[in-house]
Amino acid sequence: MGKLMLLGGSNCQLAAAQAAKAMGHTLVLADYLNAPPAKNYCDIHAQVSTFDIQGCIRAAKEHHVDGVFTVGTDQPVYTAACVAEALSLPSPISVDTALKATNKRAMKQAFQRYGIPHVAFDYLKAGQSAEHLQGLQTPLVIKPLDSQGQRGVFKVATPAEALARLPDVLRFSREDTALVETFYPSEEVTFSAYLWEGRLYPLLLTDRQLMRDPVHIGVCAAHRFPSVHAHHEPEIIRICEGVAQALGVTQGALYVQLLIGKQGILVNEAACRIGGAFEDAMIPYATGFDILQTVISTALGEPWNSAALRNPRAKTAGLQMSVQMLFCKPGTLASITPLARVQALPGVITAGYHYHVGETMPAMENATMRFGHCLLATQTGDMTARVKALYALLHVTDTDGNPLIIPRTYDGEDEPDVQQN
C-alpha cells in the first residue's frame, strides 16, 4: 500500500478520499482550510493551498509520499504534475500537458496549433483600451486564464463593458490578462474519456444544463444522461481525439466541454481529470469502469484492470442519470430536509449538502455557491418522475419560512432555452 497526497478536500474530492482509504492507502490531504469535508477520511492534513506549488512540494517531501493526484477541479492538476516531477513520482501527464489543461492561454495556443474548432477570442490586459477588442463580434464572454468553478466569468455586451469587468475577472486570477471570447449561442455537452496506451476510450456524454443568468454565465445546474446530442457522438469523439493530441495526453482521464450551435461543434475547454459533476460515480454506473480507482492506481504507478475499459457494460434502453447541483435563492437557512431522507429516495447514488442550518446562502455568482448535489440513476426510464420526487421531498427554508431551493426538471427547464458558454 502507498502513501498518497490528495490535492483538495472539498465535496468533489470526498469520494476520492474514501476510495483511496478503501484501497488501503495512507492519505495526505493538501488543503488550506481548517476542516475541509475530506479531512475525516485522511491520515494527515497538510494545511497548504493547492495553488501553492512550492508549499505542496515541501509537504510531499516532508511526508514522503509515493504519489499525488486530484479529481473534480482544474488548477490542482498543474500542481500535481509539478509535485510529481519534483519528487520523481508517477504521473499520467507531463507538466507541459498540465499547463495546457489549466491555463487557457496555453490551451488556446494548443487548439490553434492542432486545428481544434473553438470560438473567436482575444486577450485583454490592464492598461489596454476597449478598442483592442473591436475585432470580436459581440456579445462577449470575459473570463480568467487560470481559474475554476466559473469564478470571474461574465457575459458582456460591448468591449467597453469587458474592460469595466476586467478588475472583477482578475480577482480570480494570478495573471494580469483575461481571456475574451465571442459569445456563441449554443447548447453545452461534456465528454468524459480515458486514454490508455495512446488510445482514447469514450466513457460518457452528458448535457450540461446551465443556470439562467444574463451575467454570471456557464454555471452548471445539472447534468443529463443520455444526451439529446448523442447522435453527434462520432464527431465529438473525433474532435476529442484531436484535443488529446493537442494537449499531449496519452494516458489518464480527459474531460472536455463542447458547445453545439449553428456554427457546429466547438470546444469550450478541456481538462486532464475526472469531471467535477460526480462523473466518478456516473461512469462506473454506466460502463462498469471504475475510473476513480484507476486514477488512484495510476498516481502510484500500480497496475490496474483494463478489462472494463476495453469492454464496457452494455447500456440498457432505460438507462438515465441526472446530477442535480441544488441551487438556492439567497437567505439564512432555517430548516433543511435531513440528508438521510434524500439519500433514501429511489435511485439516489450519492447526495450531499454544502451548507447547513444557520448559514447564509449567498447570491449565485459561480459554481462554488451551490447548496449541494444529488446524483440520481435509473435503468427503467423514469428519471423525470425521480427528479420530481427529489424536489417534492427536499425543502430548504429561510427564517421567515420562505422556500429557498430552486427546483428543476430532468429536462433542465420547462421551456427549451439556448444555453451559454
Image (tube, grey):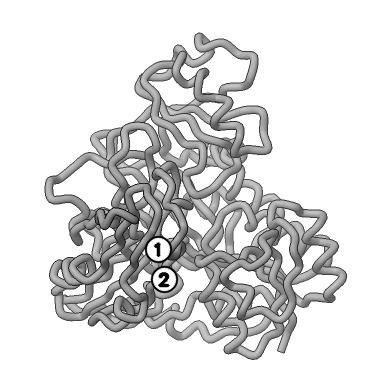
Q: Is residue 32 above or below residue 163?
A: below
* Label 2 CA crowd tier, 10 Å (few <14, some 14–19, many 20+): some
Q: Earlier in the sequence, mark 1 or mark 2?
A: 2
Q: From the image, tell me which residue sits under label 1.
A: 372
Q: Is residue 10 left or right of residue 232?
A: right
Q: Position of residue 70 (x, y in %)?
A: 61, 65
Q: Measured along the vertical axis of the image, is residue 1 above or below residue 14?
A: below
Q: Residue at x 68, y 86 (%)?
A: 25
- Check contact, mark 1 vs mark 2: CB within 8 A: yes
Image quarter where the N terminus lies is bottom right
- On the rendered structure, is 409 left or right of 79? left
Q: Quadrant of the C terminus?
A: top left
Q: Secondary structure at mark 1?
A: strand
Q: Say which amino acid is labelled 1.
A: Gly
User: Where residue 210 appears, x then y in whole percent?
Assistant: 31, 48
Question: Dot 2 corresponds to which residue?
Answer: 352
The quadrant in which residue 266 appears is top left
